[in-house]
Image (tube, rainbow, N blue to C red):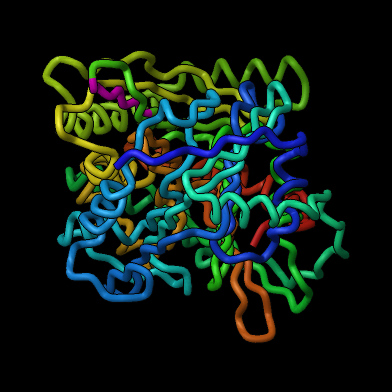
Amino acid sequence: MERRMIKEELAWNSPLAAFAPLAGCAHAHLLHAGEHAANSGWSILVAHPSRLLSVQAGRTLLDGDDVTATPFEALRALHRERSVLRKLCDVGAPFFTGLVGYVGYEMGAVLEPTAQGPVSPFALPDMNFAAYDAAVLFDNANERAFLCAHDEGAAEALKSSLVDARDPVKASAPQFDRLRSNFSAESYQAAVAEIVERIRDGEFFQANLSQRLEVRTKDPVSAVESFGSIVKQSDALFCALLQYREGTVISNSPERLFSISAIGDGRWRILAEPIKGTRPRGVDTQSDEAFASELLSDPKDRAENIMITDLTRNDLSRICCNGSVKEEEICALLPLARVYHLVSRVGGVLRDGLDPIDALTALFPCGSVTGAPKVQAMKAISEFEGVGRGPYCGAIGYIGDDGVAEFSVAIRTMIIENKGANTQIVCPVGGGVTLRSDPQAEYEETLVKAQTMLKILGFQEDARP
């Protein structure tokens, strides 16, 4: 269905400042790269959706009504009814209107029922996408902002929401109670040791084990302010702030699950970038270079990354044209502010007739947060963690009305929910366990990954549950 597009250039304001009036507004979201990212690219601001698709407690709801379609088929139907042509609103951005939201980790059991595990511990839906007929797109490199829409009412509603654009007001710092985890250091390390033994017995090759770091406060918590503090020191490409009635999801993810872009003649390219392998950054040039060299040469980390890359390549082969799946980089060094990672890049060309939902169902959940083989690893995760993951280790992103898509892996997350008189903040962190894993090193790696989130909450870098 072709629609008349509305395009208007707006006075420049930073994405964080523009979003401030929407603080606390359900279904108002901001996708925005960390301000120290190598390529800050485009930021996407959406609010006031025209339709809502959610999955909760086994029910698939569209605009509040039950639908009989499976969750991913309902998502596909919603996407297909909105198809429009990119040429109608081309400002150079990767997105103009479409679906924005997330898929929680528990949706993996919808795709593979034998991997059924504990339910999500959060009030947030297991999956939530909203359809947006207008978006504000920020070209950060050139400091230009555009309103794109295919509905005049949606354009006016969104534009009027931004008239009070301002920097978020600094609130007093909340006083949190002690840092808790569902694992002690000893029990986490014991779980790692048992996973290693089960790998040795041939049950699986790798499993990703995570712990839930949790704090509570009776003081007000500004999710927008917390997100602003994170992105101002972040160099991750896939930061996200998703606001819902039930709570807020903040992600500081460096990992792309996949992107889909047009390559002409009705063909679509898909790119996946699994991350595995971590080292902290050094305190000086010498130690920093030593950590980078150690990560690049470590056989355990390289084996872990290659194993997940193989899994990703196999997932892509289910949806890509024969012979099109290529490994573009293997175990490349990804430097971030606080850690180094190893990243591999695998691309392909989607088979005719397939769409972003096919890509999502083929790749979800990401092998880097499960392990391999994926189903056996998911079963082990359920057993050892004993609690659902919710949005953590799911996917966050968009499906454009023109067919493009991009999803990140929902790691480095902060999930904020009201619990009676308290506000609860959960920051889950984990890592991949292989045959060569050292239990203490695996535990320490999770704390390294949590440092940015914990610092934002006012904890010292050596904070431990």
Range shown magenta: 266-272
- The N terminus sits in image quarter: top left
Task: Indicate whether 261 appears above or below 179.
Answer: above
Front residue of 438/371: it is 371
Q: Is residue 268 magenta?
A: yes
Q: How many marks?
A: 0
Q: Is residue 400 magenta?
A: no
Classify residue 73 by image quadrant: bottom left
Horizontal side, residue 320 vs residue 332: left or right: left
At 53% from the left edge and 47% from the top edge, which residue is drawn? 134
Horizontal side, residue 327 vs residue 26: left or right: left
x and y, in percent, of residue 52 in the image: 41, 63
> Does residue 407 appear in this view?
yes
The dominant secondary structure in magenta is strand
Classify residue 118 by image quadrant: bottom left
Front residue of 389/266: it is 266
At 71% from the left edge and 70% from the top edge, which residue is drawn? 178
